């Protein structure tokens, strides 16, 4: 894909930079009741670490490293991406530790979750595994990573959203943006975002966050929509190209297969016809020989058909006349 997200984050990751919001989501995901946001250690990768390796949210709490991603489009490579995020974060955590020493170094328990709010139909919850990306299927992979995917669109995972008000209010904001974007049209995306922000503030949805970060929210949401639209356009183009290539290859293969089948069928039919004609000629010759030896017609007709006998006598008479 030619595009690249040259911005720090989307609204989801902006929200997760707040320890209180991260704590709330952790409690909702793990059915826990931690109350002190200062227990949360933020470890999100951003552009200060790498221009290409960035994730939405990562933090340590209760000896667990939670790596959370938000997706508005389906990506089968999330386990691979999460592996990259985990190894990058782990490298930072172990930077001053001696991993070659004799003492065991403890590392946090990794947990991977993806929150999906795209517009393609998806189940409430499902899993993706790293081993799905292996070149060949493996029954017991020596390295495995499991991503839990949660659909947070309206009508999905209501229990999770009710346990996490910040996630629920985030989805209300997303739905309002979609509503106004559809009404205003793509060219008026900024207007649609501002209308959604105004409505959220009036309804006390992410009120403080949107009031404080309004300009950045408008910017990253515009970029997010532009990025997703670019992906959609490139996928549509790829599908069209694939169909065209498929049609051309299909026609070529079809013609080739048709010729091959035609030759095979012709050979079969020719063989059968040739065998039939050859057998008939042998029968007629045999009848002629029997007639020349004085065998009676009655006896000959017990062995051969009347049709063969007639053909044999006709060809014999023609031969005698010609002579």
Image (tube, helix red, strand yellow):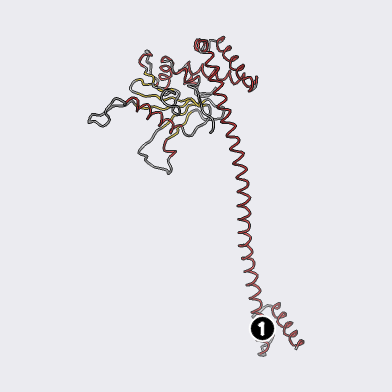
In the depicted structure, whether residue 261 falls above or below residue 10? below
The residue furthest right is: 321
- Disc 1: which residue: 287
In the depicted structure, whether residue 114 falls above or below residue 266? above
In the depicted structure, whether residue 72 falls above or below residue 317? above
Q: Position of residue 83 (x, y in %)?
A: 40, 32
Q: Position of residue 156 (x, y in %)?
A: 52, 24
**In this orientation, which residue lies closer to the viewer: 218 or 142?**
218
Q: Secondary structure at mark 1?
A: helix
Q: Position of residue 305 (x, y in %)?
A: 68, 77
**In this orientation, which residue lies closer to the viewer: 196 or 316?**
196
Mark 1, Cα crowd under 10 Å, few <14 / some 14-19 / many 20+, is many
- In this rendering, position of residue 315 left or right of residue 189: right
- In this rendering, position of residue 157 left or right of residue 184: left
- In this rendering, position of residue 281 left or right of residue 14: right
Give the residue displayed 24% in from the left and 30% down from the top: 101
Give the residue displayed 60% in from the left and 40% down from the top: 241
Q: Position of residue 110 (x, y in %)?
A: 37, 27
In the depicted structure, whether residue 316 falls above or below residue 170? below
- In this rendering, position of residue 164 left or right of residue 199: left
Image quarter in which the C terminus is found: bottom right
Please give the count of numbered marks on the rendered protein.
1
The residue furthest bottom is: 294
């Amino acid at each position: 894909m030619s595009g690249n997200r040259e911005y720090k984050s989307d609204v989801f990751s902006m929200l997760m930079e707040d320890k209180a919001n991260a704590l709330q989501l952790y409690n909702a995901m793990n059915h826990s009741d931690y109350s002190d946001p200062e227990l949360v250690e933020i470890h999100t990768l951003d552009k200060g670490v790498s221009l290409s390796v960035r994730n939405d949210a990562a933090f340590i709490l209760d000896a667990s490293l939670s790596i959370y991603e938000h997706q508005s489009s389906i990506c089968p490579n999330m386990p691979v991406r999460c592996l990259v995020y985990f190894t990058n974060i782990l490298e930072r955590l172990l930077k001053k530790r001696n991993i070659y020493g004799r003492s065991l170094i403890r590392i946090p328990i990794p947990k991977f979750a993806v929150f999906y709010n795209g517009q393609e139909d998806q189940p409430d919850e499902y899993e993706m595994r790293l081993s799905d990306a292996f070149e060949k299927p493996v029954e017991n992979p020596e390295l495995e990573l499991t991503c839990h995917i949660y659909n947070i669109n309206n009508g999905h995972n209501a229990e999770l959203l009710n346990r996490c008000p910040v996630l629920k209010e985030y989805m209300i904001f997303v739905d309002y943006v979609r509503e106004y974007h559809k009404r205003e049209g793509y060219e008026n995306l900024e207007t649609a975002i501002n209308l959604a922000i105004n409505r959220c503030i009036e309804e006390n949805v992410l009120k403080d966050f949107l009031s404080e970060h309004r300009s950045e929210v408008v910017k990253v949401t515009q970029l997010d929509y532009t990025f997703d639209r670019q992906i959609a356009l490139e996928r549509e183009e790829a599908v069209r190209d694939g169909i065209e290539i498929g049609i051309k290859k299909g026609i070529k293969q079809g013609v080739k297969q048709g010729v091959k089948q035609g030759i095979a069928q012709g050979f079969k039919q020719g063989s059968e016809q040739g065998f039939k004609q050859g057998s008939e000629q042998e029968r007629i010759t045999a009848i002629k020989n029997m007639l020349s030896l004085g065998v009676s017609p009655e006896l000959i007709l017990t062995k051969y058909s009347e049709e063969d006998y007639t053909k044999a006598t006709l060809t014999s008479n023609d031969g005698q006349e010609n002579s």
